[in-house]
Image (cartoon, rainbow, N blue to C red):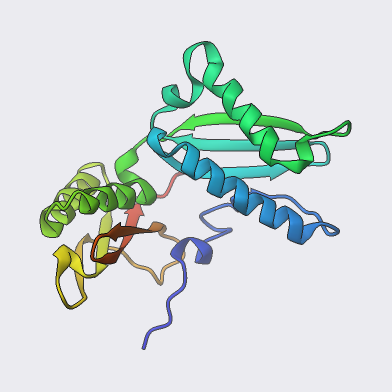
Amino acid sequence: MGQKINPKLLRIGPVFNWSSRWFDEKRYKETMLEDYFLRKALMKRLENAGISSIDIERSINSIKLSVFVLRPGMVIGRAGTGMDELRKYLVSILPKVKGKNAAKLDIRIEPVKEPNLDAYLVAKNISDQLLRRLPAKRVMNQAVSKVMGSGAKGVRIILSGRIGGAEIGRREKLQQGTVPLSTIRENIDFASVPALTKKGYIGVKVWINREREVI
């Protein structure tokens, strides 16, 4: 039986950077939980804008958020009204940005350059289509063709559960190109998004082998 780990976690350092960058020895547990609930709240609030990921960087008196979304205009709003509402919402849920010694909150909305090369957005799209009862095979084939057409070196998609409302759960796998998970040099993006259908959960896992960015 193989022992699997998260491909992004394995490549932190050589390929990826930490999504939370800070050091707080005294309040480590509280700060970590704060990051978790902050990400959870933002992923739910900005779901319609196509949110992909959130980077959090903290210093002594500032919290910098980099939010990567597919449709930045929906978040910013007309004349920045959406940003003001988002800031007020974050201030209400973040204890560190309240009171007299409040930390400065800096929010940056970054666009996703190529959504078909973002594993989370691809998995979320597959999950949404499964919720609309579209055929799983067709959904997987369309997703693979879009990813490979966007310049990926390889893609792997695995569905597991009661696919199509079947009585017995099964796994469906589709791969095209190369996805070498044991090679740390490769830029492997990974995401897992469950789809809650009427017959139960269907797990959606996506691996995308992208071109390594030259620095």
Query: Which quadrant of the figure has residue 49?
Result: top left
- When asked about the image quadrant of residue 165, the answer is bottom left
Residue in view at x 88 percent, y 31 percent: 100
Q: Residue at x 31, y 58 (%)?
A: 195
The spot of residue 20 in percent (x, y) is 64, 50
98 left or right, relative to 148: right
* Residue 191 pos. (x, y %): 39, 57
Please identify the residue farthest to the front as the structure is shown. 198
Which residue is at 60% across, 21% downward? 84
Seen as rendered, the residue at the extreme right is 100
Front-most of 133 and 123? 133
| Image spot of residue 164 (x, y percent) | 14, 63
- On the question of residue 211 being in view, the answer is no
Is 106 placed above or below 41 here?
Answer: above
Q: Nearer the viewer, residue 49 or 211?
A: 49
The image position of residue 210, as x and y in percent, is 35, 51
Question: Does residue 136 appear to the left or right of 189 in the view shown?
Answer: left
**Residue farthest along the bottom direction in this orientation:** 1
The quarter of the picture where the N terminus appears is bottom left
Which residue shows up at 28% across the image and 53% down it? 127
| Left/right of residue 120 with respect to residue 89 in the rendered view | left
Q: How many marks?
A: 0
Q: Is residue 200 visible?
A: yes
In the displayed structure, does residue 90 sit left or right of residue 201? right
